[in-house]
Image: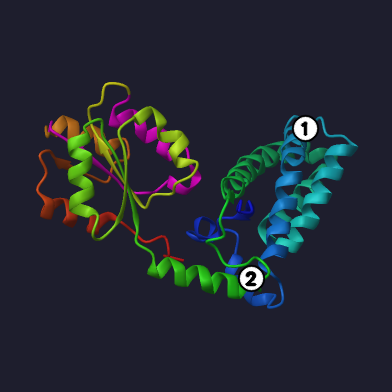
C-alpha cells in the first residue's frame, strides 16, 4: 500500500534559534494545533514574494497601491504569528511614507527591512518539507504537545553524520568506527551532496580534503547555502596535515580536522567535542 505524502514544517530546524517565537506562541495559544500553525507559515510563504516586490518599490520610492496592500496583508499575518518586531517595522515604514519629507529616510529603512525579511523568508521556506511516511507527531495535536513529542524524539534519536570521501575504504572505516554511536551515512560522489541535503539533515559532516571532482573546500559553500546548516560542524579528513591546509579549512568554516589514516579514538573525541544536538532550544 502506497504511503501518504505528508507536508509539514521542520520545526526542530526553526527551533534551533527560535527566531519565530514558536514556543511562546504554543504557550500563549494552548488550543492552537500544529496544523493551524503550519497554516500561518503557509500564508506567510504565499504572501512573501509579493511583499519582497513591494519592499523593492518602497526602497526605490516607486510605491503604488498594490505595494501598500501587500504590506497591509503581511501585517495581518505577522499579527497572527506574533512578530511584533516586523509589525512595528512595517507600520513605521508606512507612517514614514505618509510624510513626504521622510521619503529618502524611509527608502533606506525599506532596504534594511527587505534584507531582514528576505532572510526570514529563506528560513521558513527551507523548513517546508514533505515525506512519504509519518515519522513526526500528528499535526492535529495542539502545537505545545506537538513540540513535546518532537523534543522527546530528538532526545532519543541517534545523531546523524554524513561522511563524504571518494575512497570506499575510508568510508567503510568511518562507518565501522562510528556506527555504534551515530547514524552514519556515506557519500562517495561529492557532486551529489546538494541533492542529498535536500532529503537528509546531518548533525555533523566529515569531508575529505582532496577529491577529484569537488574538494572539501568547495563543498563548504554548498553546505552553508542550506539555512539549517549555517552552523553545522564540519570536520576535514585530510592526509595533508600542513598548517596552511588546516588554516585554510578553519577560515572557510570548518570546525576541526583529522589526519588520515585517522586514529579511531581521536576521531571519536573530535566528533564528541563538536557535534551539537539540535535540541539546544
Q: Residue furthest right?
A: 65
Residue 205 percent coordinates (x, y): 32, 45
Horizontal side of 188 relative to 150 (left or right) equals left
Q: Residues within 10 Å of mark 1 (few under 14, many from 20)?
A: some
Q: Are marks 2 and 1 in contact (CB under 8 Å)?
A: no
Start and end of the magenta stretch? 214-240
Foreground: 91 or 160? 160
The residue located at (25%, 30%) in the rendering is: 166
Name the image quarter holding residue 196: top left
Query: Residue at label 2?
Result: 143
Q: Residue furthest front?
A: 1
Horizontal side of 263 relative to 278 (left or right) equals left
* Secondary element at tag 1: helix
Residue 99 percent coordinates (x, y): 84, 43
Q: Earlier in the sequence, mark 2 or mark 1?
A: 1
Horizontal side of 141 relative to 234 (left or right) equals right
Q: Residue furthest top?
A: 212
Disc nearest the viewer among 2 and 1: 2
Disc marking residue 57: 1
Name the image quarter holding residue 257: top left
Residue 98 seen in this snapshot = no
The residue located at (12%, 38%) in the rendering is: 260
The residue located at (73%, 33%) in the rendering is: 56
Residue 24 percent coordinates (x, y): 61, 71
Q: Residues within 10 Å of mark 2 (few under 14, many from 20)?
A: many
* Secondary element at tag 2: helix
Residue 231: in magenta span:
yes
Distance from Cα at disc 2 to Cα at disc 1:
37 Å
Residue 152: in magenta span:
no
The residue located at (70%, 46%) in the rendering is: 45
Name the image quarter holding residue 11: bottom right
Foreground: 64 or 45? 45
Amino acid at each position: 500500500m502506497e504511503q501518504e505524502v505528508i507536508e509539514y514544517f521542520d520545526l526542530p530546524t526553526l527551533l534551533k534559534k527560535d527566531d519565530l517565537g514558536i514556543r511562546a506562541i504554543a504557550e500563549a495559544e494552548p488550543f492552537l494545533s500544529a496544523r493551524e500553525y503550519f497554516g500561518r507559515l503557509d500564508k506567510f510563504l504565499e504572501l512573501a514574494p509579493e511583499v519582497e516586490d513591494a519592499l523593492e518599490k518602497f526602497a526605490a520610492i516607486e510605491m503604488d497601491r498594490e505595494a501598500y496592500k501587500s504590506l497591509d496583508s503581511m501585517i495581518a499575518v505577522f499579527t497572527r504569528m506574533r512578530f511584533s518586531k516586523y509589525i512595528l517595522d512595517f507600520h513605521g515604514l508606512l507612517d514614514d511614507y505618509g510624510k513626504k519629507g521622510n521619503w529618502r529616510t524611509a527608502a533606506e529603512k525599506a532596504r534594511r527591512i527587505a534584507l531582514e525579511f528576505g532572510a526570514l523568508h529563506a528560513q521558513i521556506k527551507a523548513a517546508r518539507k514533505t515525506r512519504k511516511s509519518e515519522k513526526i507527531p500528528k499535526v492535529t495535536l495542539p502545537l505545545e504537545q506537538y513540540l513535546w513529542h518532537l523534543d522527546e524524539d530528538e532526545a532519543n534519536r541517534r545523531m546523524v553524520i554524513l561522511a563524504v570521501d571518494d575512497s570506499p575504504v575510508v568510508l567503510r572505516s568511518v562507518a565501522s568506527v562510528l556506527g555504534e554511536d551515530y547514524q552514519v551515512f556515506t557519500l562517495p560522489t561529492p557532486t551529489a551532496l546538494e541533492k542529498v541535503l535536500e532529503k537528509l539533515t546531518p548533525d555533523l559532516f566529515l569531508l575529505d580534503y582532496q577529491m577529484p571532482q569537488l574538494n572539501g573546500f568547495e563543498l563548504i559553500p554548498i553546505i552553508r547555502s542550506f539555512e539549517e546548516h549555517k552552523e553545522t560542524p564540519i570536520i576535514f579528513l585530510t592526509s595533508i596535515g600542513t598548517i596552511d591546509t588546516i588554516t585554510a579549512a578553519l577560515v572557510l568554516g570548518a570546525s576541526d580536522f583529522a589526519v588520515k589514516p585517522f586514529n579511531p579514538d581521536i576521531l571519536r573525541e573530535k566528533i564528541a567535542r563538536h557535534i551539537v544536538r539540535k535540541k539546544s532550544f
